[in-house]
Amino acid sequence: MTERVERSGLRWLWLSAIMFIIDQVTKYWTVKSLDLHESYQILSFFNFTYARNYGAAFSFLGDAGGWQKYLFTAIAFAVSAYLIYSLKRNSQAQRWTNIAFALILAGALGNVTDRLMFGYVVDFLDFDLGFYRWPTFNVADIAIFIGAAMIILESFFSPESKNKAQVKGEQNEQS
């Protein structure tokens, strides 16, 4: 079994574990240190602000009445299972993809842990640029964002995607 882990993308689960721990520790600190909606200014444009997100990204379905907790929990578990399966199937050589999947897995598990424990996700990173206030977010959201960005960038720059585009172009020329 150890050999299978070493040769697959599962070897990146340590990254998921570290990001999950950082996410949960920072959320625990937020809940213990701040009252709901209390804010602590770090920089003129950046605050630690305790917020609760009952929905998904940008509070999507946040006021839907409670059923969304079960939907988002089910989605998080399905995505997590798929990511673990994909990591198991991926070669260790697919480093970029494996890191992206490990980050998304950490974020999904971090936020679903909140949903199961509290019924909402704890957010605390609050940016207000004066002309725009970004929705409050957390470390799990950062991990998901970075992992998703890595997958998007890979789709544009990986040799495999370039080869697919080249083959598609050759097929179009023949038509």
Image (cartoon, rainbow, N blue to C red):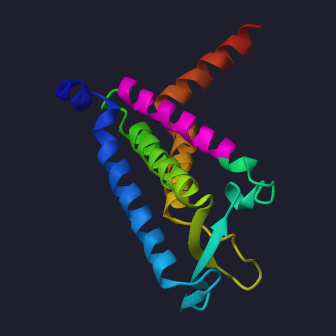
Classify the position of the N terminus by image quarter.
Answer: top left
Q: Is residue 75 magenta?
A: yes
Q: Percent position (x, y) of residue 18?
A: 33, 56
- Measuring 36% from the left and 27% from the top, which residue is drawn there? 88
The overriding secondary structure of the stretch rendered in magenta is helix
**Residue that protrudes farthest toward the left in the picture:** 2
**Residue that protrudes farthest toward the top in the picture:** 175
- Measuring 46% from the left and 79% from the top, which residue is drawn there? 32
- Measuring 43% from the left and 27% from the top, which residue is drawn there? 85
Which region shows up in magenta?
Answer: 70-89
Q: Percent position (x, y) of residue 132?
A: 75, 77
In the rendered view, does 62 fall on the left or right side of 70? right
In the rendered view, does 15 fall on the left or right side of 73? left
Seen from the viewer's position, the closer of residues 130 and 123 is 123
Q: Percent position (x, y) of residue 175?
A: 77, 8
In the rendered view, does 9 fall on the left or right side of 77? left
Q: Is residue 6 above or below residue 29?
A: above
- Measuring 64% from the left and 69% from the top, which residue is drawn there? 52
Seen from the viewer's position, the closer of residues 78 and 157 is 78
Q: Is residue 149 above or below residue 48?
A: above
Q: Percent position (x, y) of residue 101?
A: 46, 41
Q: Is residue 94 above or below residue 55?
A: above
Q: How many marks?
A: 0
